[in-house]
Amino acid sequence: MSNDSSKPVPPSSPAGDDGPANFIREIMAADVAAQAQGAVMTRFPPEPNGYLHIGHAKAICVDFGMAAEFGGVCNLRMDDTNPIAEEAEYVEAIQDDIRWLGFDWGDRLYFASDYFQRLYEYALELIRAGKAYVDSLSTEDIRDYRGNFYKPGKNSPYRDRSVEENLDLFERMKRGEFEDGSHVLRAKIDMASPNLNLRDPPLYRIRKAHHHRTGDEWCIYPMYDYAHALSDAIEGITHSLCTLEFEDHRPLYDWCVANTSVPHTPRQIEFARLSLSYTVLSKRKLLQLVKEGHVSGWDDPRMPTLRGMRRRGYTPEAIRRLCDRVGVAKRDGVVDVSLLEHALREHLNAVAPRVMAVLRPLRVVIENYPEGEVEYFDAPLHPEDDSYGTRKVPFSRVLYVERDDFREDAPKKWHRLGPGREVRLRYACLLQCNEVIKDEAGEVVELRCTWDPDSRGGTSPDGRKVRGTLHWVSAEHALDAEVRLYERLFNKENPLDLDEGESFLDHINPDSHEVVRGCKVEPSLGSAEAGHRCQFERLGYFCVDPDRRDELLVFNRTIGLRDSWAKIEKKLGGK
Protein backbone atom coordinates (compact mmCIF):
# COMPACT_ATOMS: atom_id res chain seq x y z
CA MET A 1 0.00 0.00 0.00
CA SER A 2 1.41 3.37 -0.95
CA ASN A 3 2.00 6.03 1.69
CA ASP A 4 0.17 9.27 0.90
CA SER A 5 2.55 11.84 2.38
CA SER A 6 0.34 14.68 1.17
CA LYS A 7 -2.17 14.10 3.94
CA PRO A 8 -1.66 16.18 7.08
CA VAL A 9 -0.30 14.25 10.05
CA PRO A 10 -0.96 15.37 13.63
CA PRO A 11 2.13 16.29 15.65
CA SER A 12 1.64 13.35 17.99
CA SER A 13 -0.12 10.11 17.23
CA PRO A 14 -2.55 8.66 19.77
CA ALA A 15 -1.19 5.22 19.10
CA GLY A 16 1.20 4.21 21.85
CA ASP A 17 0.69 7.52 23.67
CA ASP A 18 1.79 7.06 27.27
CA GLY A 19 0.15 10.29 28.38
CA PRO A 20 -3.33 10.69 29.85
CA ALA A 21 -6.30 9.45 27.86
CA ASN A 22 -7.69 11.85 25.28
CA PHE A 23 -10.41 10.45 23.05
CA ILE A 24 -10.81 13.84 21.33
CA ARG A 25 -7.27 13.52 19.99
CA GLU A 26 -8.21 10.21 18.41
CA ILE A 27 -11.32 11.66 16.77
CA MET A 28 -9.50 14.70 15.46
CA ALA A 29 -6.59 12.62 14.24
CA ALA A 30 -9.01 10.49 12.22
CA ASP A 31 -10.75 13.58 10.82
CA VAL A 32 -7.44 15.17 9.86
CA ALA A 33 -6.21 11.95 8.24
CA ALA A 34 -9.46 11.69 6.25
CA GLN A 35 -9.42 15.41 5.46
CA ALA A 36 -13.01 15.38 6.67
CA GLN A 37 -13.14 18.90 8.02
CA GLY A 38 -10.32 20.91 6.48
CA ALA A 39 -7.81 22.86 8.58
CA VAL A 40 -8.57 22.42 12.27
CA MET A 41 -10.35 25.32 13.93
CA THR A 42 -11.75 25.26 17.46
CA ARG A 43 -13.15 28.00 19.67
CA PHE A 44 -13.49 28.89 23.34
CA PRO A 45 -16.94 30.50 23.75
CA PRO A 46 -17.40 31.99 27.25
CA GLU A 47 -20.44 34.00 28.22
CA PRO A 48 -19.17 37.39 29.48
CA ASN A 49 -21.35 37.29 32.59
CA GLY A 50 -18.75 36.42 35.22
CA TYR A 51 -15.16 35.51 35.90
CA LEU A 52 -13.46 32.35 34.67
CA HIS A 53 -12.70 29.56 37.14
CA ILE A 54 -10.48 26.49 37.06
CA GLY A 55 -13.22 24.47 35.37
CA HIS A 56 -13.01 26.87 32.44
CA ALA A 57 -9.24 26.42 32.49
CA LYS A 58 -9.61 22.82 31.42
CA ALA A 59 -11.89 23.81 28.54
CA ILE A 60 -9.39 26.48 27.51
CA CYS A 61 -6.54 23.96 27.58
CA VAL A 62 -8.56 21.49 25.51
CA ASP A 63 -9.81 24.04 22.95
CA PHE A 64 -6.50 25.82 22.41
CA GLY A 65 -4.36 22.74 23.01
CA MET A 66 -6.10 20.50 20.50
CA ALA A 67 -6.03 23.19 17.83
CA ALA A 68 -2.31 23.75 18.34
CA GLU A 69 -1.57 20.03 18.37
CA PHE A 70 -3.10 19.62 14.93
CA GLY A 71 -1.61 22.78 13.46
CA GLY A 72 -4.87 24.71 13.62
CA VAL A 73 -6.17 27.81 15.37
CA CYS A 74 -8.59 28.53 18.18
CA ASN A 75 -10.98 31.47 18.17
CA LEU A 76 -12.07 33.35 21.26
CA ARG A 77 -15.76 34.15 20.97
CA MET A 78 -17.86 35.92 23.57
CA ASP A 79 -21.34 34.40 23.50
CA ASP A 80 -22.94 37.69 24.47
CA THR A 81 -26.63 36.93 23.88
CA ASN A 82 -27.98 37.93 27.31
CA PRO A 83 -27.64 41.71 27.75
CA ILE A 84 -28.97 41.65 31.32
CA ALA A 85 -26.03 39.69 32.74
CA GLU A 86 -23.15 40.74 30.50
CA GLU A 87 -20.65 43.52 31.06
CA ALA A 88 -17.60 44.87 29.24
CA GLU A 89 -15.65 44.32 32.48
CA TYR A 90 -16.06 40.57 32.12
CA VAL A 91 -14.97 40.70 28.47
CA GLU A 92 -11.67 42.29 29.48
CA ALA A 93 -11.20 39.99 32.48
CA ILE A 94 -11.75 36.87 30.38
CA GLN A 95 -9.13 37.94 27.86
CA ASP A 96 -6.67 38.78 30.62
CA ASP A 97 -7.15 35.41 32.34
CA ILE A 98 -6.71 33.42 29.13
CA ARG A 99 -3.51 35.26 28.29
CA TRP A 100 -2.24 34.67 31.83
CA LEU A 101 -2.99 30.98 31.40
CA GLY A 102 -0.64 31.00 28.41
CA PHE A 103 -2.90 31.04 25.35
CA ASP A 104 -3.51 33.56 22.60
CA TRP A 105 -6.10 33.90 19.85
CA GLY A 106 -4.24 36.41 17.70
CA ASP A 107 -6.70 38.57 15.79
CA ARG A 108 -9.54 36.05 16.13
CA LEU A 109 -11.61 37.69 18.87
CA TYR A 110 -15.28 37.47 17.96
CA PHE A 111 -18.65 38.12 19.56
CA ALA A 112 -21.97 36.42 18.96
CA SER A 113 -23.31 39.96 18.71
CA ASP A 114 -21.17 40.34 15.56
CA TYR A 115 -23.65 37.96 13.95
CA PHE A 116 -26.97 39.31 15.25
CA GLN A 117 -28.12 40.40 11.80
CA ARG A 118 -27.16 37.11 10.19
CA LEU A 119 -28.76 35.11 13.00
CA TYR A 120 -31.94 37.11 12.50
CA GLU A 121 -31.88 36.35 8.78
CA TYR A 122 -31.39 32.63 9.47
CA ALA A 123 -34.42 32.79 11.76
CA LEU A 124 -36.43 34.26 8.86
CA GLU A 125 -35.29 31.29 6.75
CA LEU A 126 -36.66 28.90 9.36
CA ILE A 127 -39.99 30.75 9.49
CA ARG A 128 -40.36 30.78 5.71
CA ALA A 129 -39.59 27.05 5.61
CA GLY A 130 -42.29 26.38 8.21
CA LYS A 131 -39.67 25.30 10.75
CA ALA A 132 -40.15 28.09 13.28
CA TYR A 133 -43.14 29.94 14.70
CA VAL A 134 -43.97 32.74 17.08
CA ASP A 135 -45.53 31.39 20.25
CA SER A 136 -47.66 33.61 22.49
CA LEU A 137 -48.03 31.24 25.41
CA SER A 138 -46.79 32.50 28.79
CA THR A 139 -43.49 31.21 30.11
CA GLU A 140 -45.34 29.03 32.59
CA ASP A 141 -47.63 27.56 29.91
CA ILE A 142 -44.68 26.84 27.62
CA ARG A 143 -43.06 24.93 30.46
CA ASP A 144 -46.28 23.02 31.14
CA TYR A 145 -46.89 22.21 27.47
CA ARG A 146 -43.34 20.94 27.15
CA GLY A 147 -43.99 17.96 29.39
CA ASN A 148 -41.20 16.08 31.11
CA PHE A 149 -39.27 12.82 30.94
CA TYR A 150 -42.42 10.85 31.75
CA LYS A 151 -44.99 12.87 29.81
CA PRO A 152 -44.77 13.91 26.16
CA GLY A 153 -45.28 17.52 25.31
CA LYS A 154 -48.31 18.91 23.53
CA ASN A 155 -48.48 21.38 20.70
CA SER A 156 -48.97 25.04 21.42
CA PRO A 157 -52.25 26.45 20.05
CA TYR A 158 -50.04 28.93 18.16
CA ARG A 159 -47.89 26.24 16.51
CA ASP A 160 -49.84 26.30 13.25
CA ARG A 161 -49.77 30.02 12.65
CA SER A 162 -49.21 30.85 8.99
CA VAL A 163 -45.82 31.77 7.65
CA GLU A 164 -47.09 35.27 6.94
CA GLU A 165 -48.38 35.80 10.47
CA ASN A 166 -45.15 34.48 11.97
CA LEU A 167 -43.05 36.77 9.78
CA ASP A 168 -45.20 39.74 10.76
CA LEU A 169 -45.07 38.98 14.47
CA PHE A 170 -41.34 38.32 14.44
CA GLU A 171 -40.69 41.61 12.64
CA ARG A 172 -42.84 43.44 15.19
CA MET A 173 -40.97 41.71 17.99
CA LYS A 174 -37.78 43.09 16.47
CA ARG A 175 -39.27 46.59 16.29
CA GLY A 176 -40.05 46.51 20.01
CA GLU A 177 -43.86 46.50 19.75
CA PHE A 178 -44.27 43.81 22.43
CA GLU A 179 -43.26 43.51 26.06
CA ASP A 180 -40.75 41.05 27.44
CA GLY A 181 -42.18 37.55 27.73
CA SER A 182 -45.21 38.16 25.52
CA HIS A 183 -43.86 36.19 22.54
CA VAL A 184 -40.97 33.87 21.70
CA LEU A 185 -39.79 32.38 18.44
CA ARG A 186 -39.68 28.59 18.70
CA ALA A 187 -38.25 25.91 16.44
CA LYS A 188 -40.90 23.53 15.11
CA ILE A 189 -39.36 20.09 15.67
CA ASP A 190 -41.16 17.41 17.71
CA MET A 191 -43.14 17.93 20.89
CA ALA A 192 -43.13 14.17 21.52
CA SER A 193 -39.37 13.76 21.25
CA PRO A 194 -37.73 11.85 24.11
CA ASN A 195 -35.07 14.56 24.05
CA LEU A 196 -36.64 17.55 25.80
CA ASN A 197 -34.30 19.90 23.96
CA LEU A 198 -36.11 19.05 20.70
CA ARG A 199 -39.59 19.86 21.97
CA ASP A 200 -39.89 23.09 20.02
CA PRO A 201 -37.09 24.91 21.84
CA PRO A 202 -37.14 28.72 21.95
CA LEU A 203 -34.81 30.42 19.48
CA TYR A 204 -35.48 34.10 20.26
CA ARG A 205 -36.94 36.01 23.17
CA ILE A 206 -37.83 39.65 23.72
CA ARG A 207 -35.45 41.41 26.08
CA LYS A 208 -35.57 45.19 26.17
CA ALA A 209 -32.18 45.76 27.73
CA HIS A 210 -29.08 47.71 26.81
CA HIS A 211 -26.40 45.52 25.25
CA HIS A 212 -22.75 46.17 26.09
CA ARG A 213 -21.81 46.29 22.37
CA THR A 214 -24.93 46.88 20.28
CA GLY A 215 -26.59 49.31 22.66
CA ASP A 216 -30.34 49.56 22.07
CA GLU A 217 -30.27 48.40 18.45
CA TRP A 218 -31.89 45.06 19.29
CA CYS A 219 -34.70 44.13 21.61
CA ILE A 220 -34.84 40.47 20.60
CA TYR A 221 -31.95 38.19 21.38
CA PRO A 222 -31.12 34.66 20.21
CA MET A 223 -31.07 31.83 22.70
CA TYR A 224 -27.73 30.25 23.54
CA ASP A 225 -28.25 26.92 21.73
CA TYR A 226 -29.29 28.64 18.52
CA ALA A 227 -26.62 31.36 18.56
CA HIS A 228 -23.86 28.99 19.61
CA ALA A 229 -24.43 26.47 16.82
CA LEU A 230 -24.78 29.03 14.05
CA SER A 231 -21.87 31.15 15.29
CA ASP A 232 -19.67 28.05 15.09
CA ALA A 233 -20.87 27.46 11.54
CA ILE A 234 -20.37 31.08 10.50
CA GLU A 235 -16.77 31.06 11.75
CA GLY A 236 -15.95 27.76 10.08
CA ILE A 237 -15.28 25.88 13.31
CA THR A 238 -14.35 22.29 12.52
CA HIS A 239 -14.56 20.81 16.02
CA SER A 240 -16.88 22.37 18.57
CA LEU A 241 -15.57 20.98 21.87
CA CYS A 242 -18.10 21.19 24.72
CA THR A 243 -18.51 19.76 28.19
CA LEU A 244 -20.84 16.82 28.78
CA GLU A 245 -23.90 18.83 29.81
CA PHE A 246 -24.23 19.79 26.13
CA GLU A 247 -24.43 16.18 24.94
CA ASP A 248 -28.24 16.22 25.02
CA HIS A 249 -28.14 19.54 23.20
CA ARG A 250 -26.15 18.15 20.27
CA PRO A 251 -29.26 17.08 18.26
CA LEU A 252 -30.52 20.67 18.50
CA TYR A 253 -27.07 21.98 17.55
CA ASP A 254 -27.09 19.74 14.48
CA TRP A 255 -30.72 20.67 13.66
CA CYS A 256 -29.95 24.40 13.66
CA VAL A 257 -26.97 23.89 11.36
CA ALA A 258 -28.77 21.49 9.02
CA ASN A 259 -31.88 23.63 8.59
CA THR A 260 -30.25 26.96 7.80
CA SER A 261 -28.01 28.05 4.95
CA VAL A 262 -24.89 28.45 7.10
CA PRO A 263 -21.65 27.97 5.16
CA HIS A 264 -20.14 25.21 7.26
CA THR A 265 -21.03 22.10 9.29
CA PRO A 266 -19.05 21.84 12.55
CA ARG A 267 -18.73 18.64 14.56
CA GLN A 268 -19.67 18.90 18.22
CA ILE A 269 -17.76 16.65 20.64
CA GLU A 270 -18.45 16.53 24.37
CA PHE A 271 -15.94 15.79 27.14
CA ALA A 272 -16.03 15.62 30.94
CA ARG A 273 -15.74 18.88 32.78
CA LEU A 274 -13.17 19.41 35.53
CA SER A 275 -14.56 19.01 39.04
CA LEU A 276 -12.36 19.18 42.14
CA SER A 277 -12.89 17.87 45.64
CA TYR A 278 -13.38 20.47 48.41
CA THR A 279 -14.40 22.93 45.67
CA VAL A 280 -17.59 24.50 44.31
CA LEU A 281 -17.58 25.64 40.68
CA SER A 282 -21.23 26.55 40.20
CA LYS A 283 -21.32 30.16 38.98
CA ARG A 284 -24.53 30.72 40.92
CA LYS A 285 -23.02 29.46 44.17
CA LEU A 286 -19.79 31.39 43.63
CA LEU A 287 -21.91 34.51 43.15
CA GLN A 288 -23.71 33.72 46.41
CA LEU A 289 -20.38 33.46 48.23
CA VAL A 290 -19.43 36.91 46.95
CA LYS A 291 -22.77 38.66 47.44
CA GLU A 292 -23.29 37.34 50.97
CA GLY A 293 -19.78 38.30 52.04
CA HIS A 294 -18.45 34.82 52.73
CA VAL A 295 -15.42 35.82 50.65
CA SER A 296 -13.97 39.25 49.94
CA GLY A 297 -14.71 39.16 46.21
CA TRP A 298 -14.21 37.26 42.97
CA ASP A 299 -10.44 37.51 43.47
CA ASP A 300 -10.46 36.26 47.05
CA PRO A 301 -7.46 33.89 47.19
CA ARG A 302 -9.71 31.07 48.42
CA MET A 303 -11.94 31.25 45.34
CA PRO A 304 -11.47 28.81 42.44
CA THR A 305 -11.68 31.70 39.98
CA LEU A 306 -8.54 32.26 37.94
CA ARG A 307 -8.49 35.76 39.45
CA GLY A 308 -8.47 34.32 42.96
CA MET A 309 -5.91 31.65 42.16
CA ARG A 310 -3.60 34.22 40.55
CA ARG A 311 -3.82 36.44 43.63
CA ARG A 312 -3.05 33.50 45.88
CA GLY A 313 0.07 32.73 43.88
CA TYR A 314 -0.93 29.83 41.66
CA THR A 315 1.09 29.56 38.47
CA PRO A 316 -0.45 29.00 35.05
CA GLU A 317 2.03 26.16 34.54
CA ALA A 318 0.61 24.29 37.54
CA ILE A 319 -2.96 24.65 36.28
CA ARG A 320 -2.02 23.53 32.77
CA ARG A 321 -0.08 20.61 34.25
CA LEU A 322 -3.17 19.51 36.18
CA CYS A 323 -5.35 19.72 33.08
CA ASP A 324 -2.83 17.68 31.14
CA ARG A 325 -2.55 15.01 33.84
CA VAL A 326 -6.27 14.43 34.28
CA GLY A 327 -6.69 13.91 30.54
CA VAL A 328 -9.89 14.20 28.52
CA ALA A 329 -12.55 11.69 29.43
CA LYS A 330 -16.11 10.87 28.37
CA ARG A 331 -17.47 10.56 31.89
CA ASP A 332 -17.68 13.18 34.62
CA GLY A 333 -15.67 12.53 37.74
CA VAL A 334 -14.14 14.38 40.66
CA VAL A 335 -10.40 15.03 40.71
CA ASP A 336 -8.71 15.01 44.11
CA VAL A 337 -7.68 18.60 44.81
CA SER A 338 -4.42 17.17 46.18
CA LEU A 339 -3.40 16.53 42.57
CA LEU A 340 -3.69 20.25 41.83
CA GLU A 341 -1.77 21.08 45.00
CA HIS A 342 0.91 18.57 44.05
CA ALA A 343 1.28 20.16 40.60
CA LEU A 344 1.54 23.57 42.24
CA ARG A 345 4.23 22.53 44.74
CA GLU A 346 6.10 20.74 42.00
CA HIS A 347 6.28 23.88 39.85
CA LEU A 348 6.92 26.34 42.68
CA ASN A 349 9.69 24.12 44.01
CA ALA A 350 11.38 24.48 40.63
CA VAL A 351 10.93 28.22 40.14
CA ALA A 352 10.39 29.99 43.46
CA PRO A 353 13.40 31.81 44.98
CA ARG A 354 14.06 31.08 48.66
CA VAL A 355 13.96 33.72 51.37
CA MET A 356 13.51 33.80 55.13
CA ALA A 357 10.55 35.20 57.02
CA VAL A 358 9.43 34.92 60.63
CA LEU A 359 5.65 34.97 61.05
CA ARG A 360 5.44 34.98 64.85
CA PRO A 361 8.69 36.58 66.01
CA LEU A 362 10.52 35.74 69.21
CA ARG A 363 13.41 38.06 70.07
CA VAL A 364 16.86 36.51 70.39
CA VAL A 365 19.82 38.41 71.84
CA ILE A 366 23.28 36.95 71.11
CA GLU A 367 25.17 38.06 74.18
CA ASN A 368 28.66 37.31 72.87
CA TYR A 369 28.14 39.14 69.58
CA PRO A 370 29.39 42.76 69.53
CA GLU A 371 26.76 45.48 69.73
CA GLY A 372 26.43 47.56 66.58
CA GLU A 373 28.28 45.04 64.42
CA VAL A 374 26.72 43.58 61.27
CA GLU A 375 27.98 40.92 58.90
CA TYR A 376 26.45 39.37 55.83
CA PHE A 377 26.13 35.74 54.88
CA ASP A 378 25.71 34.54 51.31
CA ALA A 379 22.53 32.54 50.86
CA PRO A 380 21.47 30.82 47.63
CA LEU A 381 18.19 31.94 46.11
CA HIS A 382 17.59 28.41 44.89
CA PRO A 383 19.28 25.29 46.30
CA GLU A 384 19.02 23.34 43.04
CA ASP A 385 19.59 26.07 40.44
CA ASP A 386 22.77 28.15 40.63
CA SER A 387 21.48 30.48 37.90
CA TYR A 388 19.24 32.15 40.48
CA GLY A 389 22.34 33.49 42.22
CA THR A 390 22.63 34.47 45.87
CA ARG A 391 21.52 37.22 48.20
CA LYS A 392 23.24 38.84 51.19
CA VAL A 393 21.53 38.08 54.51
CA PRO A 394 22.42 40.51 57.33
CA PHE A 395 23.34 39.09 60.75
CA SER A 396 23.46 41.12 63.96
CA ARG A 397 23.30 40.86 67.74
CA VAL A 398 19.49 40.81 67.88
CA LEU A 399 17.56 38.36 65.73
CA TYR A 400 14.04 37.04 65.41
CA VAL A 401 13.22 33.35 65.26
CA GLU A 402 9.86 31.64 64.96
CA ARG A 403 8.07 31.41 68.31
CA ASP A 404 6.99 27.86 67.42
CA ASP A 405 10.67 26.90 67.18
CA PHE A 406 11.16 27.33 70.96
CA ARG A 407 9.93 25.21 73.84
CA GLU A 408 10.87 25.84 77.41
CA ASP A 409 10.05 22.29 78.46
CA ALA A 410 11.32 20.61 75.33
CA PRO A 411 10.81 16.85 74.91
CA LYS A 412 13.79 14.59 74.33
CA LYS A 413 13.51 14.48 70.55
CA TRP A 414 12.97 18.22 70.21
CA HIS A 415 15.60 19.44 67.73
CA ARG A 416 14.81 23.13 67.92
CA LEU A 417 15.55 25.79 70.53
CA GLY A 418 15.14 25.18 74.24
CA PRO A 419 17.13 25.98 77.38
CA GLY A 420 20.62 24.55 76.91
CA ARG A 421 19.81 23.39 73.36
CA GLU A 422 21.97 24.18 70.36
CA VAL A 423 20.65 24.71 66.84
CA ARG A 424 21.94 25.82 63.47
CA LEU A 425 20.81 29.16 62.08
CA ARG A 426 20.47 28.58 58.38
CA TYR A 427 23.46 29.95 56.40
CA ALA A 428 24.85 31.64 59.55
CA CYS A 429 26.15 29.78 62.62
CA LEU A 430 25.47 27.51 65.58
CA LEU A 431 23.47 29.07 68.41
CA GLN A 432 22.81 27.93 71.99
CA CYS A 433 19.99 29.13 74.25
CA ASN A 434 21.19 29.99 77.75
CA GLU A 435 18.43 32.05 79.38
CA VAL A 436 14.69 32.63 78.96
CA ILE A 437 13.21 36.07 79.67
CA LYS A 438 9.51 36.35 80.51
CA ASP A 439 7.09 39.22 81.03
CA GLU A 440 4.90 39.75 84.08
CA ALA A 441 2.27 37.42 82.66
CA GLY A 442 4.83 34.64 82.36
CA GLU A 443 5.04 34.72 78.58
CA VAL A 444 8.41 34.18 76.96
CA VAL A 445 9.49 37.47 75.33
CA GLU A 446 13.22 37.00 74.75
CA LEU A 447 15.95 34.38 74.59
CA ARG A 448 19.51 35.08 75.66
CA CYS A 449 21.88 33.04 73.55
CA THR A 450 25.50 32.64 72.54
CA TRP A 451 26.93 31.82 69.15
CA ASP A 452 30.00 29.90 68.08
CA PRO A 453 32.10 32.33 65.98
CA ASP A 454 33.98 29.40 64.49
CA SER A 455 30.75 28.03 63.03
CA ARG A 456 30.25 30.78 60.47
CA GLY A 457 28.18 29.47 57.57
CA GLY A 458 26.57 26.87 59.82
CA THR A 459 29.41 24.37 59.92
CA SER A 460 30.43 22.49 63.03
CA PRO A 461 34.16 23.13 63.54
CA ASP A 462 34.70 20.21 65.91
CA GLY A 463 32.35 17.84 64.14
CA ARG A 464 29.65 17.91 66.81
CA LYS A 465 26.18 16.96 65.61
CA VAL A 466 23.55 19.68 65.56
CA ARG A 467 20.33 18.31 64.13
CA GLY A 468 18.01 21.30 64.17
CA THR A 469 18.16 24.11 61.61
CA LEU A 470 16.06 27.26 62.04
CA HIS A 471 15.23 30.22 59.83
CA TRP A 472 15.71 33.71 61.24
CA VAL A 473 15.99 37.41 60.38
CA SER A 474 18.06 40.27 61.74
CA ALA A 475 15.86 42.51 63.92
CA GLU A 476 17.62 45.67 62.78
CA HIS A 477 17.22 44.91 59.09
CA ALA A 478 13.95 42.99 58.91
CA LEU A 479 10.96 44.48 57.10
CA ASP A 480 7.46 44.54 58.52
CA ALA A 481 4.89 42.34 56.83
CA GLU A 482 1.35 41.12 57.07
CA VAL A 483 0.85 37.50 56.09
CA ARG A 484 -2.49 36.01 55.13
CA LEU A 485 -2.70 32.29 55.65
CA TYR A 486 -5.16 30.46 53.41
CA GLU A 487 -6.52 26.94 53.50
CA ARG A 488 -9.23 25.21 51.47
CA LEU A 489 -12.47 27.17 51.51
CA PHE A 490 -14.57 24.10 52.27
CA ASN A 491 -13.92 21.40 54.87
CA LYS A 492 -16.07 18.73 53.21
CA GLU A 493 -14.85 16.70 50.25
CA ASN A 494 -18.10 17.27 48.36
CA PRO A 495 -19.64 20.49 49.66
CA LEU A 496 -22.76 19.81 47.59
CA ASP A 497 -23.43 16.40 49.15
CA LEU A 498 -25.98 17.71 51.60
CA ASP A 499 -28.25 16.25 54.22
CA GLU A 500 -31.79 17.52 54.50
CA GLY A 501 -31.85 21.12 55.65
CA GLU A 502 -28.15 21.68 54.97
CA SER A 503 -26.60 24.34 52.78
CA PHE A 504 -23.22 24.16 51.09
CA LEU A 505 -22.44 27.26 53.17
CA ASP A 506 -22.53 25.07 56.28
CA HIS A 507 -19.30 23.48 55.10
CA ILE A 508 -17.22 26.62 54.76
CA ASN A 509 -13.95 26.06 56.58
CA PRO A 510 -13.83 28.54 59.50
CA ASP A 511 -10.03 28.26 59.45
CA SER A 512 -9.67 29.01 55.75
CA HIS A 513 -8.32 32.53 56.36
CA GLU A 514 -6.05 33.88 59.08
CA VAL A 515 -4.27 37.23 59.07
CA VAL A 516 -0.95 37.33 60.91
CA ARG A 517 0.40 40.79 61.65
CA GLY A 518 3.77 41.84 63.01
CA CYS A 519 5.67 39.43 60.77
CA LYS A 520 9.31 40.06 59.86
CA VAL A 521 10.92 39.29 56.50
CA GLU A 522 14.47 39.61 55.22
CA PRO A 523 15.35 42.89 53.48
CA SER A 524 15.87 41.32 50.04
CA LEU A 525 12.06 41.38 49.71
CA GLY A 526 11.86 45.15 49.94
CA SER A 527 11.47 45.61 46.19
CA ALA A 528 9.13 42.66 45.63
CA GLU A 529 6.15 43.70 43.54
CA ALA A 530 2.60 42.36 43.64
CA GLY A 531 2.52 38.85 42.19
CA HIS A 532 6.10 37.99 43.21
CA ARG A 533 6.26 34.36 44.34
CA CYS A 534 8.82 32.91 46.71
CA GLN A 535 9.36 30.21 49.29
CA PHE A 536 9.59 31.23 52.91
CA GLU A 537 12.08 28.61 53.99
CA ARG A 538 10.56 25.91 56.21
CA LEU A 539 7.12 27.55 55.99
CA GLY A 540 5.70 27.30 52.47
CA TYR A 541 5.18 29.23 49.27
CA PHE A 542 3.97 32.82 49.37
CA CYS A 543 2.99 35.57 46.96
CA VAL A 544 3.02 39.36 47.32
CA ASP A 545 -0.58 40.63 47.43
CA PRO A 546 -1.73 43.72 45.49
CA ASP A 547 -2.55 45.29 48.87
CA ARG A 548 1.17 45.76 49.59
CA ARG A 549 2.21 49.28 50.48
CA ASP A 550 5.56 51.02 50.70
CA GLU A 551 5.53 50.76 54.49
CA LEU A 552 4.06 47.27 54.73
CA LEU A 553 4.58 44.17 52.65
CA VAL A 554 1.54 41.88 52.36
CA PHE A 555 1.92 38.20 51.49
CA ASN A 556 -0.58 35.46 50.75
CA ARG A 557 0.31 31.89 51.57
CA THR A 558 -0.11 30.02 48.32
CA ILE A 559 0.40 26.58 49.82
CA GLY A 560 2.35 24.90 52.60
CA LEU A 561 5.31 22.60 52.11
CA ARG A 562 3.53 19.40 53.01
CA ASP A 563 2.40 17.33 50.05
CA SER A 564 -0.51 15.02 50.73
CA TRP A 565 -0.61 13.85 47.12
CA ALA A 566 2.99 12.63 47.26
CA LYS A 567 2.05 10.64 50.36
CA ILE A 568 -0.93 9.16 48.55
CA GLU A 569 1.29 8.18 45.61
CA LYS A 570 3.80 6.59 47.95
CA LYS A 571 1.03 4.68 49.68
CA LEU A 572 -0.21 3.42 46.32
CA GLY A 573 3.26 2.36 45.31
CA GLY A 574 3.63 5.14 42.72
CA LYS A 575 0.68 3.94 40.65
Image (cartoon, helix red, strand yellow):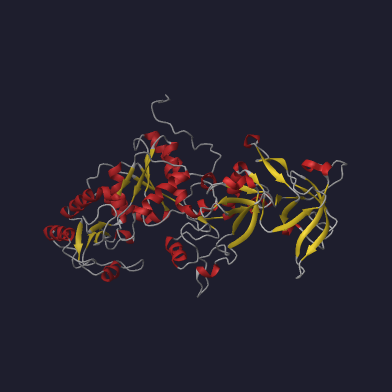
Q: Please tell me which residue is depicted at 44% across the width and 51% down the height of the picture.
A: 56
Determine whether 561 is above or below 149 in the image: above
Q: Please tell me which residue is depicted at 29% across the width and 45% down the height of the picture.
A: 233
Residue lying at the far bottom of the rendered structure: 501
Task: Count numbered badges in the picture.
Answer: 0
Give the quarter of the image for residue 65.
Answer: top left
Residue lying at the far left of the rendered structure: 164
Residue lying at the far top of the rendered structure: 2
Q: Please tell me which residue is depicted at 51% across the width and 46% down the height of the picture.
A: 316
- The percent coordinates of residue 473 (x first, y second) are 70, 50
Taking depth in this image into account, of 175 and 454 the one nearest to the observer is 454
Determine whether 403 is above or below 318 in the image: below
Taking depth in this image into account, of 327 and 475 the one nearest to the observer is 475
- The percent coordinates of residue 336 (x first, y second) are 57, 55
- The percent coordinates of residue 484 (x first, y second) are 58, 58
Left/right placement of residue 359 relative to residue 447 reads left
Q: Can residue 563 be seen in this view?
A: no
Q: Is residue 340 visible?
A: yes
Of the 4 image quadrants, the one containing the N terminus is: top left
Left/right placement of residue 414 relative to residue 15 reads right
Taking depth in this image into account, of 405 and 99 the one nearest to the observer is 405
Left/right placement of residue 450 relative to residue 33 reads right
